[in-house]
Amino acid sequence: MAMTYSGLYLQTRRTLKEAGSIAADLAARELVCSVSGKNRETLIRDGGLYVPPEIEAQVAALTARHLAGEPVAYIIGEWEFYGLTMYLSPKVLIPRPDTECLVDRAVEYLKTQGPCRVLDLCAGSGCVGIAVASQVPEVKVVLGEISDAALKLCSRNIWTNSFSGRVVPVKADALQEPDPRLGRFQCIVCNPPYIPSGDIPGLDPSVRDYEPHLALDGGPDGLAFYRAIAEKWRGALHSGGRVFFEIGADQVLPVARILRQHGFGEIQHFDDRSGLPRVVTGIRYPDL
């Protein structure tokens, strides 16, 4: 029996809900849109049209992959972050709504700074730095990332979102001293690996088995990148510049302590939209 696009969406959603899938509505919509080449608006507009059998079969196959544990974002190869489309692969983390808090706080600060340079360190797909550039037209952004595969995605996302010339990808190891040729920045934003190594085996399988451990593993206590960046990258900030870190659970106090130990002050933390501590920021004090 022929099925409409609305019927295909509802059937896919029902299948996912019955299997206990989280966010079944979103997953069903993204799977149907990806296979059919539609967006949210055209899926609604064309809801009464009949679906070709090959599209119905492809959606069923992708739904089965998702039910086996594979994240929808990797299946379709893209995801939305801060209203922007980001291309993805299993070489980078999937952007999450919680991380939009990091962008919010950095944007609020940068709107008071005028033209300046921003570094998105541990950039992954480049989603944070590109989102910042989208909200603050006066800034220029460098996406610093060690993974060559991630840098290729950064380049694609820069081009796709029309930020060529104002956002550039650069190979950079957050655990090492920066190349002096990078220059200095008014702001560093960073969503580093922050999960303690011993906690990774206990993560949800959709994260543990699919997302890159390079972008998850923060060392034995989850704080290795915060220590390295506060110490080694402090000099990449102008005096009076700010660093903004995304943090994990129970990391407000240890990250604040690390910043103080390395000459940062005016330290604040901010909650995400779920009310959980998500961002710690500090200002680089002048050298004595």
Image (cartoon, rainbow, N blue to C red):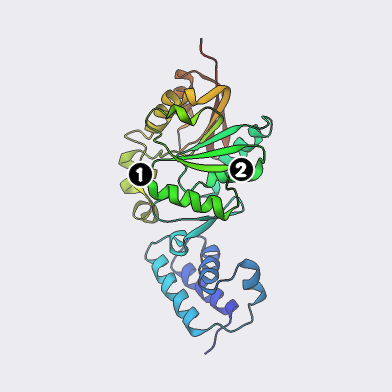
Residue displayed at 62% across by 67% down: 40
Q: Secondary structure at mark 1?
A: helix
Q: Position of residue 237 (x, y in %)?
A: 52, 25
> For this rendering, which residue is in front, 102 or 131?
131
Q: Between label 2 and label 1, give the one nearer the viewer.
A: 2
First in sequence, mark 2 or 1: give its number. Answer: 2
Tell me where residue 103 sits by quadrant: top right
Q: Is residue 54 left or right of residue 39?
A: left
Q: Position of residue 222 (x, y in %)?
A: 38, 35
Mark 2 Cα shell of 10 Å, populated few (<14), some (14-19), many (≥20): many
Mark 2 and mark 1: span between their CA atoms? 25 Å
Q: Which residue is mark 1?
A: 214
Q: Residues within 10 Å of mark 1 (few under 14, many from 20)?
A: some
**In the image, which disc is placed on residue 161?**
none
Left or right of 99? Residue 149 is left
Q: Is residue 267 above or below residue 14?
A: above
From this viewpoint, is residue 275 visible?
A: no
The image shows residue 154 at horizontal and vertical percentages of 48, 48
Circle 2 residue: 133
In percent of the image, x 35 and y 38: which residue is there? 196
Residue 76 position within the rendered picture, expressed as x and y whole percent measured from the top left: 47, 64
